[in-house]
Image (cartoon, rainbow, N blue to C red):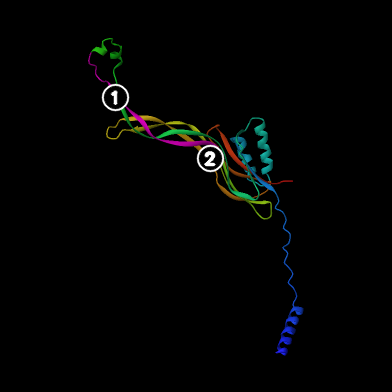
Amino acid sequence: MKSFVISALGFIAFTCLGAKAEEPVVAPPQKAAQALNLIFDVQIVAIPQKLALPLVRELKDPRKIDEAWNKIQALLDDGTATLIGWPIIMTKGRGSPLNSFEAIHVIRYPDDFRAGGVGLYFPASDMRDSGAKERNREIDGTEFSAIPSVFQTRTIGVKLEIEATLLDDGKTINLNVTPEDSKLKGMRKVSLQRPGTGDTVTVDQPDFEVLRVSQNLLMKSGERFLLGASPITEPADHIEVLILHSEVRKLK
């Protein structure tokens, strides 16, 4: 019995002396996240067509786009070009799912009609006759009127939606961008026919002009990019251009 106890004690002592205590694992210190903002703007400009065409060609060239942009600023300063809108969006950190800008007007207009009442009218000669009210008057015609039954709501103006993510290099931005410029061109006449009678009535309906672009791209901080260019009706003989600029701005 004593031999067994001594052997056991010896084994325990050997184990304790031979084993090394494990050192705690210390995680390397992490750098604090850099405070920064992502800033985007889209300049929407209407340029006379003769001046716009060579500028659009320069805007498509990454080597010439900054020079072309400076020329457009000079045209804006002297009143030759017209600024349609300049939405700016800022998001903090490395990006966020969706950011938006709107400078709009809301228009409500009738979209569907139902048959209205019948208007009766009489010859002008009868109306001038002082005795017209005292005798039976022959009906000269009828008028079919349309009564609005359904209304639509539409916004016009400048909109911008952006989804942005800053990549690991801290300079490249993965970007989904959708700018829109919509305007009311005017009202147009639309003829409606009453079923089964052939009677018609004319109503006014709005006519819209919309320039909308949706793109997914990678951009470096400080770069500009031509999103699109299109002829527009107002101002006449002008081309509207949309120029995107992005910036990663670190906070001091």
Label 1 Cα neighbours within 10 Å, binned few <14 / some 14-19 / many ≥20: few
Q: Secondary structure at mark 2?
A: strand
**Identity of the residue furthest to the front in this view:** 1
| Residue 20, quarter of picture | bottom right
> In the image as oriented, which residue stretches furthest toward the right?
17
Which residue is identified by label 1?
A: 142
Earlier residue among tags 1 and 2: 1
Residue type at mark 2 is Leu
Q: Residue at x 66, y 52 (%)?
A: 172
Picture coordinates of residue 52 (x, y %)?
61, 37
Q: Which residues are magenta?
A: 135-158
Instruction: Specify the quadrant that holds the N terminus.
Output: bottom right
Is 241 left or right of 205, judged from the image as shown? right
Does residue 95 show up magenta in the picture? no
| Residue 156 is one of the magenta-drawn residues | yes
State whether residue 118 is above or below residue 181: above
- The local secondary structure at tag 1 comes to strand
Residue farthest toward the left in the current orientation of the protein: 136
Give the image quarter of residue 82.
top right
Label ID, residue 211: 2
Q: Is residue 27 left or right of residue 112?
A: right
**Residue at image coords 68%, 51%:** 171
Q: Is residue 223 visible?
A: no
Q: In the rendering, at what x and y percent does residue 67 appear? A: 69, 41
Q: Main secondary structure of the magenta part?
A: strand
Q: Nearer the viewer, residue 152 or 178?
A: 152
Q: Is residue 166 left or right of residue 9?
A: left
Residue at the (71%, 86%) spot, across then down: 5
Task: Name the spot of residue 243 as percent of width and height, x first.
Answer: 62, 42
Q: Is residue 197 above or below residue 225?
A: above
Disc 1 to disc 2, C-alpha distance: 43 Å
The image quarter containing residue 213 is top right
